[in-house]
Amino acid sequence: MKIRNRLMTVAIVAIMTAISGCSRTFDEVNTDPDALPDVPPTNMLANVLRNSGEQFGGDIDGYGTFAGYIVKIQYLDYFGGLVPTNNGYGNRWYACYYNNTQLKDLLAKTEEAADAYKNIRLVARLWQCYMWQYLTDGWRDVPYSEALQGAEEEGSILKAKYDKQEDIYPAVMASLKAIADEMATGFGTDEVGEGDFIYQGDMEKWQRFCNSLRLRMAIHISGVAPDLAKSTIEEICTQPEKYPVINSNAANCYLYWPGAAPYYEPWYETGYTGDSRVNNFGMADIFIDHLKEMEDPRIASVANVASDGEYRGYQNGAKTPPPVLTRISYIGDRYMKNAAGFTPFFKSCESYYIMAEAAMLGYNVGISAQEAYENAVRLSMEDNGISQAATEAYLAGKGKWDNTKERIWWDEWVALFKDNFEAWALYRRTGIPSTNYPSLNSIYGDAHNDQPFRIPYPNNEYLFNRENLDVVLSNVSDYAWGQQMWWDTRTGVK
């Protein structure tokens, strides 16, 4: 609770300081002698992590629907929100650039005393990479090489060009490797401070997140840049002491919320009015059907039984709502009914699903595909509060290893629940779940036979950077389809 209370205190200071910046003239005539002369680096980090949790942890029916987990059951989803003026998606774009601007400022302010701020600078650089990965995996081609260079001394680039995803990925992966190598030589002596809401200054866990993020990006491109993917994954997996990964639930990259106003866990804040559950969200039919067919014990964690005691999902974009809303399973209490719940950025099981897939590709990961798969399942079950007996029964039954990549992907899909953005990436890359489908009554009719390939570019890019945006819009259809992600090699989707 002490740690969670820090989130409110530090974030409030960070926010108030951040929004108080004005022009030099204004500052000269509006100087508050009692105000902080500068923002402590840990407060800047706090602001970024909190903002990341709110923007990227709050999605329920967007990425959650794209991934095949969650559907709207009261106000049905017909893809009408996939427009540039949708602030929900646009705000995530702005959050990525805002966060990277704040982190860039943090790094600039600590540059002259870099050794004295080594640890917080490592975390800042690492989170910058995470923001770039999120951006390009959401929108594909985005401003990167010319981004954040609006200051006069940096070129006054107010309309940045768009870089291709196939150029962004290797650049971000190179940055992550540089951070990983620096961490491998030793950490600094500085305290990251109270602004580290995720790991509370535990640099070893940040190191694990760094290498796990490298694994994620590498497996994403295994079908289009196999040499870079293989060399990255093998470097990490064959040198676990130098490049440790997140391999236990204790090291999960989770942001836990204070659970007091205004800092509620985002799903709880969206899903509850007082003590009453908002009945707009239900479980997708394909998700519940799969869990029941597989006799997967995680169903009790990710979903609640309907009012008649059964687990039941609903169609995505049905013509009409279910006659009785409560006859559809709601999101499980573990994931929604906890004001002090968590926002996941990386789960330990994901590391092992990646290793299992890499082993199937013939990479040297120091572990067999079966062992990696079973480790992943056990970690996912543990994270969902499933008993060891039920876990072993699943591994001996419907979840038994069958020496296929599909078995890995199907189980990974279940395990990634609530990390909906990454689950959507898994689907776009692998086609699993193969039962996924777009809104049945889409406003686009039969123009698209698949879930969206990307997030719509925000309206401000249309208004203020149209010349550069037009270059990529030639490859975009109906805001969210058209050209697939660089690493999305599926065929027959449109």
Image (tube, rainbow, N blue to C red):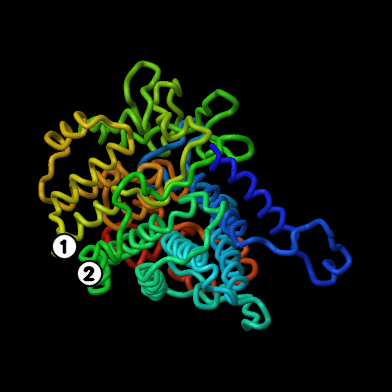
Residue at position x 16%, y 62% from top?
A: 361
Which image quadrant: the C terminus?
Answer: bottom left
Quadrant containing the N terminus is: top right
- Separation of residues labelled 1 and 2 (CA atoms): 9 Å
Residue name at image x 39 percent, y 25 percent:
328
Residue under pointer 2: 230
Q: Earlier in the sequence, mark 1 or mark 2?
A: 2
Can residue 374 be seen? yes
The 10 Å Cα crowd at callout 2, few under 14, some 14 to 19, many 20 or more, is: many
Q: Is residue 330 left or right of residue 388?
A: right
Residue 183 x/y as whole percent: 39, 67
Residue 90 visible in the current orientation = no
Three-letter code, disc 1: Leu
Percent x, y of residue 364: 15, 65
Asked if the residue under mark 2 is in contact with the one under mark 1, i.e. CB atoms within 8 Å, the reply is: yes
Dividing the picture into quadrants, the one containing residue 466 is bottom right
Disc 1 designates what residue? 361
Question: Dot 1, how many residues are within 10 Å of its Cα: few (below 14), some (14-19), or many (20+)?
Answer: some
The correct choice, above or below, for 290 with respect to 67 in the image is above
Q: What amino acid is at disc 2?
A: Lys
- The answer to whether 399 appears left or right of 205 in the picture is left
- Identified at 62% across, 56% down, the residue is 43
Residue at far front of view: 189
Residue 488 placement (x, y as % from top left): 31, 62
Give the left or right position of residue 293, taking residue 187 as reference: left
User: In terms of secondary structure, where does tag 2 sit?
Assistant: helix
Q: Residue at x 19, y 48 (%)?
A: 373
- Name the one closer to the observer, 163 or 416: 416
User: Residue 417, how many percent across, how many down?
Assistant: 36, 42
Considering depth in this image, is 89 or 384 the residue closer to the camera?
Answer: 384
